[in-house]
Image: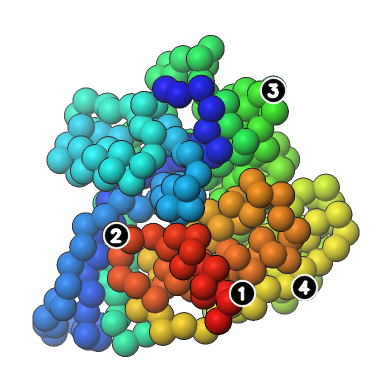
Amino acid sequence: MENYFDIIGTGTAVIDDLLILPDFPTQNTKVEVLQRKKQVGGSVPMALKTLTSLDLKTAFMGKIGNDEDSSFIKKQLRESGINVTNLVEERGAKSPYSQVWININNGSRTIAVDSGKAPVLKERNLDFTCLAECKIFHIDSNEHDVTKKLINLYKTKGAKISIDTGRFKEKTLELLNMVDIIIMPLSFAMDWIGKYNFVGLISQVGAKYPNKLVIITDGEMGSICSCQGNIYRQKSFKVNCVDSTGVGGVYAGGILYGVTKNWEIPKTLEFAAAISALHCSKIGYDEMPGLAEVEAFLAN
C-alpha cells in the first residue's frame, strides 16, 4: 500500500443491482425493465468514488466474500482508481446485495437488501504497524470494534476522523464521541434526539458536540450544519432527479473534499449540495461528477 492518501475509508461494500422502471408496479402485476446496471454501492465506497473523481488519492479497507459479486466489487473499486490493497477476501462468504427499483419519472427508489452473513473486518485481517497515513479517515457505523482501534491509530497519525452514520444504532453513539466530522441523515437524528424540526435537531446535536463539524441531511430539504456554536443552512439544488441511489455517500464525499481544501463551511456545504444534485441527474455511477462539472453547475 502507498504511504499517503488524501482519504482512507473503511466500511461495507455492497452490490447495487439497479433496475430502471417506467413506474412502480402494483402487487401481482408486471412491468418492463427499461435499463439495468450492476454497480458497487455502500456509503464509504460511494464517498471514495466521489473523491477519486475529484482527483484525490483514496484507499478502501474492508472485507468482502469470494463469490462472483465480491470479485466484481474488487474489480470495480480498483477501476475507479481506489486503492484496494487492504480489501480482504473471506473464503465461503458472500458480499451484501441490494436490488434497487428506480422510478424513472421522479428518481424515487425502493430497495430490497440481502445482507446475508456479510463478512466483517477483524483486527487480525490488518497489519496495524504499516497502514498508510491520510488527511481524513472516513468510516460508516457497521464494523464497530475494529473501527474503534483504527480511529485511535489514525488520530495518532494526525488524521481527522469522519463518520457517515447511516441508520440509527445505539452503539454508533460511542463512535460519535471519537470523531471530528459527523454526517447523519434526518432519520438518525430523529430516532436519537426526537421529532424536532431541522433547527431544533441541529441545536441539540451541536450542543452535545460544540467542537465538531455536525451535519444533518434530508434530501430535497437540503442540509443544516453546526460548528463552534454557529448554524449554517444549505438548500438543495433543483434538478431533474432520475436516480438518487448512493446520493448520501456522494454528499459525504463533497463535504470531505471541502475539508481537505480548508474551505469555509458555507462553500463546503454548497459544493456538497451541487455534486449531489449532479449525481441525481444521472442513472448509475459510471461517470461520477468531476470538479469542472461541479464548478460549471455552480457558475450557472
Q: Which mark is first along the chain, 1 or 3?
A: 3
How crowded pointer 4 is (Cα within 10 Å; few <14, some 14-19, many 20+) is rated as: some
Q: What residue would you read off at disc 3?
A: 156
Task: Determine the image quadrant of residue 154.
Answer: top right
Of 218 and 242, nearer the camera is: 242
Please indicate whether residue 280 sits to the left or right of residue 71 in the image. Answer: right
Q: Check whether the beta carbons of the residues at disc 1 and disc 2 lie within 8 A of each other.
A: no
Q: Residue furthest top?
A: 129
Q: CA distance from mark 1 to mark 4?
A: 12 Å
Nearer to us in this view, 238 or 212: 238
The label nearer to you, 3 versus 4, is: 3
Q: CA distance from mark 3 to mark 4?
A: 34 Å
Residue 21: x and y, percent? 22, 79
Disc 3 to disc 1, how far (Cα)?
A: 34 Å
Q: Which residue is mark 4?
A: 199
User: Which residue lies at the image location 42% right of the left edge and 22% below the top edge?
Assistant: 1
Q: Residue at x 60, y 46 (%)?
A: 163
Can you name the residue that lies furthest to the right here? 229
Q: Residue at x 49, y 64 (%)?
A: 292
Local secondary structure at mark 3: helix
Any mark on residue 222, and which?
Answer: 1
Residue designated by label 2: 286
Crowd tier of the residue under label 3, counting other residues whose Cα lies within 10 Å: few below 14, some 14–19, many 20 or above? few
Q: Residue at x 50, y 14 (%)?
A: 130
Dot 2 amino acid type: Asp
Can residue 144 be seen here? no
Which sits in the foreground, 93 or 261?
261
